[in-house]
Amino acid sequence: GAVVSQHPSRVICKSGTSVKIECRSLDFQATTMFWYRQFPKQSLMLMATSNEGSKATYEQGVEKDKFLINHASLTLSTLTVTSAHPEDSSFYICSARDRQGGGFNSPLHFGNGTRLTVT
Amino acid sequence: GQNIDQPTEMTATEGAIVQINCTYQTSGFNGLFWYQQHAGEAPTFLSYNVLDGLEEKGRFSSFLSRSKGYSYLLLKELQMKDSASYLCAVRGGTYKYIFGTGTRLKVLA
């Protein structure tokens, strides 16, 4: 089945630094990937839609200059949290859909998530 | 606006049957998905409905009524490993996936 790999799984960084999270589709091509954020005991909140070869589409309230998204190839999207602050500490999850392999009704497949802690 | 509602928590006994409800109001509808998520892990896909009716997949079944904006996930023969959060997600008119608040299910021995 479709596999999405996300790295790193955990990262601790100091306030003011930047952190890059990678999301790869291992056995399929993903023209679109989605980045979600999840707070403890809450559901997934869509942050942005990453489009291969073009600019990402951000949801209302998400700062595009703070959460930089790059989708340089059909198998890789990156999310960079710039000038991180403690309030950015969260669980970040990427996802993609294998539209070619699974058809129109194929579900989202998720990476294993990245637990970011900003001290 | 877009809204997806689920009960926050449910408790059931091992071997029992539990039904988790989901109601939605979204701009457009292109399918409803159920995911299971264990604490600290990524969600895994359980089932998909786009037409009205019941979809059965082993111990799990999912039902959809588009006219009522309603779905449920039915879990039979509950096992301890079924303790997890269950997320209802709607693929809306723009093909974005909007997730519900999630239901934390606790299975007791």
Image: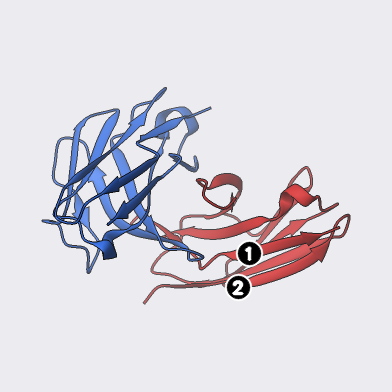
Q: Mark 1 lies on which chain?
A: B
* The C terminus of chain A: image quadrant: bottom left
Label of residue B1 in the image: none
Circle nearer the N terminus (2, 1): 2
Q: Residue B85: x percent and y percent?
A: 61, 58
State which quadrant residue A62 falls in: bottom left
Position of A21 compared to B2: left or right?
left
Q: Which chain carries label 2?
A: B
Residue B54 appears in the picture as rendered: no
| Chain represented in red | B
Q: Residue B7: x percent and y percent?
A: 62, 74
Q: Residue beneath label 1, please?
A: B104
Q: Which residue lies furthest to the left in this view?
A: A65
How far apart marks 2 and 1 lie (CA) works out to 6 Å
Q: Respond whether the residues carrying marks 2 and 1 are from the same subunit.
A: yes
Mark 1 neighbour class, 10 Å CA radius: few under 14, some 14 to 19, many 20 or more: many
The residue located at (60%, 55%) in the rendering is B51
Secondary structure of the residue carrying tag 1 is: strand
Q: Residue A35: x percent and y percent?
A: 32, 49
Label of residue B8 in the image: 2
In the figure, the shade used to draw chain A is blue
* Type of amino acid at the residue the image marks with label 2: Thr
The residue located at (22%, 44%) in the rendering is A19
Q: In this view, does A62 lie above or below A16?
A: below
Position of B20 compared to B33: left or right?
right
The residue located at (28%, 65%) in the rendering is A87
Position of A46 compared to A83: left or right?
right
Q: CB atoms at circles 2 and 1 under 8 Å apart?
A: yes
Q: B48 or B101: which is nearer to us? A: B101
Q: In this view, does A2 lie above or below A116?
A: above
